[in-house]
Every structure is written in structure tokens, then in C-alpha cells.
Image (cartoon, helix red, strand yellow):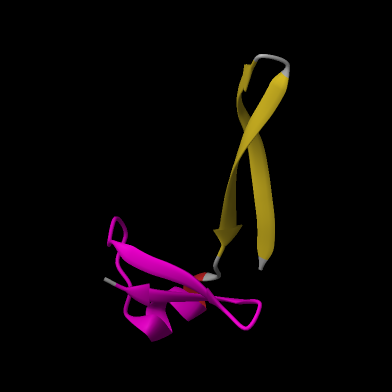
């Protein structure tokens, strides 16, 4: 997996970025996730946990 970012805008000399994680197709299929599905995310013990909503 890879963490990607893109600058979304600049405001008052500060840059703001959007981040996303690329998840391999095999993992998405195993989880039964579908494109456009709402997901919940939280941080537990310095780990990112993502679940279906």
C-alpha cells in the first residue's frame, strides 16, 4: 500500500493537502467493500482502523 498526497489549495501562505491510501484490489474484494461505500476511520494505539459504515 502507498500513502499519496496532493496539494488542494493555498491560503494565507499556508498549503493544505489531501491524503489517500491505495488499497490493492485483492484486499478490497476480501473485505467485500464496494466503490462509493461509506467507511468509518479511527486511530487505535497509533494504528488506522477502517470499517464499513
Q: Residue at x 54, y 67 (%)?
A: 23
Q: Is residue 29 left or right of residue 52?
A: right
Q: Is residue 9 left or right of residue 49?
A: right
Q: Is residue 41 magenta?
A: yes
Q: Is residue 27 left or right of residue 33?
A: right
Which corner quadrant of the image does residue 53 belong to?
bottom left
- Location of residue 5 in the rendering, given as x and y in whole percent from the top left corner: 66, 43
In the figure, 38 relative to 5: above or below?
A: below
Q: Residue at x 34, y 66 (%)?
A: 39
Q: Nearer the viewer, residue 32 or 45?
A: 45
In the figure, 44 relative to 12: above or below?
A: below
- Location of residue 16 in the rendering, given as x and y in whole percent from the top left corner: 63, 31
Q: Residue at x 67, y 50 (%)?
A: 4
Q: Residue at x 32, y 59 (%)?
A: 35
In the figure, 43 relative to 36: above or below?
A: below
In the figure, 40 relative to 6: above or below?
A: below
Total marks in image? 0
Q: Quadrant of the N terminus?
A: bottom right
Residue closest to the far right: 13
Which corner quadrant of the image does residue 32 belong to?
bottom left
Q: Is residue 34 magenta?
A: yes
Q: Which residues are magenta?
A: 27-52
Residue closest to the far top: 12
Q: Nearer the viewer, residue 6 or 13?
A: 13
Amino acid at each position: 500500500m502507498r500513502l499519496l498526497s496532493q496539494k488542494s489549495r493555498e491560503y494565507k501562505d499556508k498549503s493544505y493537502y489531501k491524503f489517500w491510501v491505495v488499497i490493492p484490489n485483492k484486499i478490497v474484494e476480501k473485505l467485500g467493500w464496494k466503490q462509493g461505500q461509506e467507511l468509518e476511520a479511527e486511530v487505535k494505539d497509533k494504528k488506522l482502523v477502517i470499517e464499513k459504515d
